[in-house]
Amino acid sequence: MRKKRHLSIEEKRDWLAVIFRDESGEFSQADKFKALAEDTKLAQLQAEESGKQAPKEQKNGPSLAEAIDLLSYLPPPMK
């Protein structure tokens, strides 16, 4: 049997979760934020595939409340 060439969405999200939840210091805060952003995109794709997508108006990006929630995960600015 031939090996699969691409990862599934679930496999990608699992890998991104490992990066986002890293506590060893291997990944920077920027890496964690990028992983969170990519995971959000994959979650949207997954929702579209399963037919749970919200109305088309929300396809342009996250709402203001969602964006503020994402910003709450950023660390405080360095001095």
Image: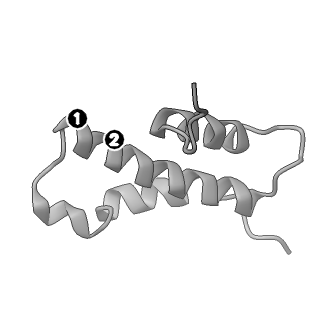
Vertical comparison of 11 with 55: above or below: above
Bin the neighbour count of mark 2 within 10 Å (Cα to Cα): few under 14, some 14-19, many 20 and up: some
Q: Is residue 68 left or right of residue 25?
A: left
Provide the secondary structure element on which disc 2 rests. helix
Question: Across the whole image, how many numbered discs are drawn on residues?
Answer: 2
Provide the secondary structure element on which disc 1 rests. helix
Bin the neighbour count of mark 1 within 10 Å (Cα to Cα): few under 14, some 14-19, many 20 and up: few
Q: Which image quadrant: the C terminus? A: bottom right
- Residue under pointer 1: 50
Residue at horizontal 57%, vertical 44%? Answer: 5
Q: Is residue 72 left or right of residue 64?
A: right
Under mark 2, the amino acid is Gln
Instruction: Give the x, y percent position of residue 78.
Output: 82, 70
Q: Colour scheme in the image?
A: one colour
- Residue under pointer 2: 46
Under mark 1, the amino acid is Ser
Vertical comparison of 34 with 26: above or below: below
